Amino acid sequence: MSTFEHERAAQALLDARRTRRWIEALPPGTQPAQESDAYAIQELVAAELGAVMGWKVGAATLHSEPSRAPLHAATLFENGDLPAQMFHVMGVEAEIVYRLGRDLPPRERPYAREEILAAVHTMHPAIEIVDTRFASLSSIDALCQRADQQNHGALAIGPGLEEWSDIDPPRQIVRLTINDSLARENTGGNSAVDPVRLLQWLASRGSSRLGGLKAGQIITTGSCTGTIFVEPGARVRAEFPGLGTVELAIA
């Protein structure tokens, strides 16, 4: 795929965001055929969305290759209301977020686990809103979803916990409540199992093309509850006992 075709794909996604006319597929000849194509499109879109303020990273299993997408200020929120008109679809997921206290710049030598842990300032509960610029999320392949910011819609972040070293994500209980009814309760629940491995990959490889990781950036590490689709007006609460709680309303 040529640079020109990457640009055509990115422009189609940007136009969909601007006009809210959702696309059935990327233009003929511009669909990503491999991971590098998907990331090239993703990065062109990111360049138009502003400074990178955070990342989403995840993996299908404990040992599979992670994937990432940069996040921007317009879709990062604290507890509160999110406007429903922001979204095409609304899938809610409870997630664990890390906020960095120091830079992790690109380098040849991979970052060790201890370096990653030392760079984390706070840990947070969060709710991600899954969304798409495509007409139907279910009919789009994984590489096109990757190109489309890995289905990111918004991220609501709860208060940070500075003394987080006793939090063990694979054993962490999480409860997701929708409209005052318990929708999901898990222990762990993240398909990637170990979020620190995701942070290592992101620092060592995944973020290098966009300047590495910066102090103050947040990193959300994948769903602990699976995705549950909701309608406008939904009230959502994610509770991680010992870590904290985040609440939002999609109004």
Image (cartoon, rainbow, N blue to C red):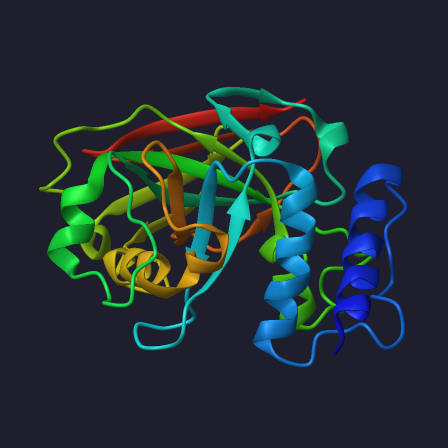
Query: On the picture, is 117 further left or further right than 74?
Result: left
Query: On the picture, is 212 further left or further right than 132?
Result: left
Task: Pick whichever, 188 or 99, lies toward us.
Answer: 99
Residue at (35% x, 31% y) in the render: 216
Residue 95 in picture, x, y percent from top left: 39, 45
Quadrant where the image shows the C terminus: top right
Tag count: 0
Task: Pick whichever, 132 or 203, lies toward us.
Answer: 203
Residue at (81% x, 72% y) in the render: 30
Query: On the picture, is 233 further left or further right than 51?
Result: right
Residue at (16% x, 48% y) in the render: 117
Residue at (85% x, 77% y) in the render: 29
Residue 156 in picture, x, y percent from top left: 49, 31
Q: Is residue 168 visible?
A: no
Q: Quadrant of residue 49?
A: top right
Residue 250 in picture, x, y percent from top left: 63, 27
